[in-house]
Image (cartoon, rainbow, N blue to C red):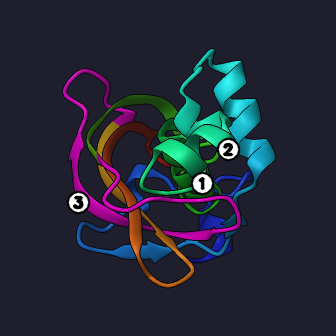
Amino acid sequence: MNDENRHPRGGLYFEDFTVGATIKHRLTRTVTQMDNMLFSNMTLNPQPLHIDAHFCATETEWGKPLMNSLFTLGLMIGISVNDTTVGTTIANLGMTDVKFPAPLFEGDTINVTTEIADKRESKSRPNAGIVDFIHRAYKQDGTLVAECRRQAFMRKRNA
């Protein structure tokens, strides 16, 4: 994709997405205990699986805190934004098929891919279309740790 065809902020327009294409995102992120604590506390989630190291060490099979899955979901989608939708999304329409097939822990580094699963013209707005993304997050050893399908309402280039 030629940079002059992108939105000034870097996002792609509806016309730029090709069904079946997969984007490997450049950004990666090592997750931290602070991420886990802040996110869990900001969302009023008192689950000891995320915020209580002693509980995890003595009462769970993991032996250490798991990263909050909603943090993982948000981070996975956030990593995708810079290469796909920044400045060109009208709205997120929903997320389905959310899965967390393996645990993510403090110190793991995730990388993300986005597959363009489908797209269609908007029936109600001629200046927009709907794109279905499948986001996948992997930790440093290649283990899939998160996946979801997301529908986004996207601007067309000449709208």
Q: Which residue is mark 1?
A: 64
Q: Is residue 110 left or right of residue 157?
A: right
Answer yes or no: is residue 135 visible: yes
At horizontal 76% and vertical 32% (from top left) the residue drawn is 38
Q: Which residue is mark 3?
A: 117
Image-based side of 114 in relation to 107, left or right: left
Q: Is residue 154 above or below residue 3?
A: above
Nearer-N-terminus badge (1/2): 2
- Identify which residue is drawn at 44% across, 44% down: 156
Residue drawn where x is 24% and y is 21% of the image: 124
Q: Nearer the viewer, mark 2 or mark 3?
A: 2
Which amino acid, by three-letter code, is at mark 3? Answer: Ala
| Relative height, residue 9 to residue 74 (above, below) | below
Question: Which residue is disc 2 drawn over?
Answer: 53
Where residue 65 appears, x then y in whole percent?
A: 60, 48
Q: CA distance from mark 1 to mark 2?
A: 6 Å
Residue 73 image offset from top left, x and y in percent = 48, 45
> What numbered label is drawn on residue 41?
none
Q: Residue at position x 23%, y 41% from top?
A: 121
- Give the alpha-carbon distance from disc 3 to disc 1, as whole Å: 36 Å
Which stretch appears magenta? 99-128
Q: Quadrant of residue 83?
A: bottom right
Q: Amino acid at mark 2?
A: Ala
Residue 158 visible at all: no
Q: Nearer the viewer, residue 93 or 106?
A: 106
Of residue 15 and residue 102, the one placed in the foreground of this image is: 102
Assess whether mark 2 and mark 1 are in contact (beta carbons under 8 angstroms).
Answer: yes
Q: Amino acid at mark 1?
A: Lys
The quadrant of the rendering that contains the N terminus is bottom right
What SS does tag 1 mark? loop
Horizontal arrangement in the rendering, residue 13 relative to residue 97 (left or right): right
